[in-house]
Amino acid sequence: MPLPLVAIVGRPNTGKSTLFNRIVGSRIAIVSDVPGTTRDHIASRISNERMDYLLIDTGGMGGGTEDLDFESDVEAQSELAVEHADVIVVVLSGKEDLTSADHAVAEVLRKRKRKHVPVIVVVNKIDNAAKIDEILPQYYELGIGEKFLPISAAHGSGFSALEDGIIEELKKLHFTKVATTNPEVGTQSPRIAVVGKPNVGKSSIINALMSDPQRAVSPRIVSDIPGTTRDAVDTIIRFNEKEYIFVDTAGIRRKKEAEPGIETLSYFRSVRAIAECDIAVLVLDGTGPITRQDKRIAQLALEEGKGLIIAVNKSDGMELEQKKNTINDVHLTLPFCKFAPVILCSGKTRDGLLKLFDLIETVQRNRTRRISTKDLHDWYATAMRSQPMAQLAGSKHITQADELPPTFVVFVKDPKSVKASELRFLENRMRTVFAFEGSPIRWITKGPKLVNE
């Protein structure tokens, strides 16, 4: 069963991104007092002991932004989220009366959402829950939901009731917790999402990886027409007596270029495929430049904590010097992916593709790798030697959290004073010793009171 999709919608500046960050547990979405700051969908997988789902933060609907050039495009993308969501969370501002934009959002829900999809109405910015009875009647006139929850996304009040409400509605729709196995045991076949823009050769690569009998029975459709693959399709490929689950995804276009209907549905399925995979293989077109959309797809995989391999397709016929230049271009254009291995390959001739299996094994091993606390302490003492970083240099304890991707917790006196550049320095030092090729690394800084907890 695919991950259910929960969409947070509402007019601009009601606190949608703050609520999204509160549910996710980290500051992924940009939070600003400027209406319309969120222009794009931001997705994050939510996992707990009761349910897994994909949470989408959307731009504001109903007008009211200060960026008129993007307003219609942002609204169109938010409407797409409404059309494909399994549960919709509508965010209203409890500090203001209902506006024409709120009514416009309600009208979109009445016209665009699927009939069976439940709506949870969240009244945000309520610091005193007792006030909700005074202001609740005006919200009934919107006619968009039966469940109304007062919350303060900024302070966290009412948050647990919202989480319970989302899970309750998903269970009513017969969604269940996704069964998982411990990744360290290695009994589960790795799930690899083959992602990229339309027409870069994703289906051709999967075809080339199949055995001849398998390809004869169930080949992927290949065409020069962008967008031929409309769905995310699983293909089990066996290599060296091991099974790998490859997911051929529809090409992820820049959303303003996506046509209404089936193309936009393909986008959401591709986002889900990334959220559900272990490793993303980003396919680039070796005959053209790396684009902003290539960067965005890579960033999406890293935000989700997935392993990453970069495959430059259509590289057959390249001379040795051209191959070196191509790899250098990838490193220069995608500097935030410098830890990701790069292969030159051809879905047409199969050149270089067998290297992909060795890289998948390496990346999966690194993504689930654990380092003992003793080894971390020894490494940290060496890394901090003669470094002018007061907070990090004074730390006496570092450990690895029980999370994926590899996450390291450093205990310092003042976590807020640790700079992002200092954590990047730590990551660079760690990769020189422990490699972690193909896997993102995350850092958490905590205060000293938590060391003995």
Image: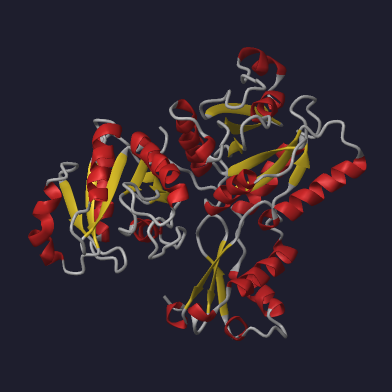
In this image, 127 relative to 37: left or right? Answer: left
Q: Position of residue 18 (x, y in %)?
A: 36, 61
* Identity of the residue furthest to the top in this view: 216
Q: How many marks?
A: 0
Q: Considering depth in this image, is 60 or 391 the residue closer to the camera?
A: 60
- The answer, for residue 43, to whether it is visible in the render is no
| Residue 199 to residue 192: above or below | above
| Residue 289 to residue 27: above or below | above
Q: Quadrant of the N terminus?
A: top left
Residue, x 68% and y 15% (percent of image)?
213
Residue, x 11% and y 66% (percent of image)?
130
- The answer, for residue 37, to whether it is visible in the render is yes
| Residue 5 to residue 65: above or below | above
Quarter of the rendering containing residue 211? top right
Q: Quadrant of the C terminus?
A: bottom left
Q: Position of residue 273 (x, y in %)?
A: 51, 37
Q: Considering depth in this image, is 118 or 207 the residue closer to the camera?
A: 118
In this image, 384 relative to 160: left or right? Answer: right
**Display colour scheme:** secondary structure
Quarter of the rendering containing residue 193? top right
Q: Considering depth in this image, is 23 or 278 the residue closer to the camera?
A: 23
Q: Position of residue 356 (x, y in %)?
A: 72, 38
* Identity of the residue furthest to the front in this view: 68
Residue, x 71% and y 69% (percent of image)?
429
Quarter of the rendering containing residue 441? bottom right
Q: Position of residue 46 (x, y in %)?
A: 40, 50
Q: Considering depth in this image, is 363 or 376 the residue closer to the camera?
A: 363
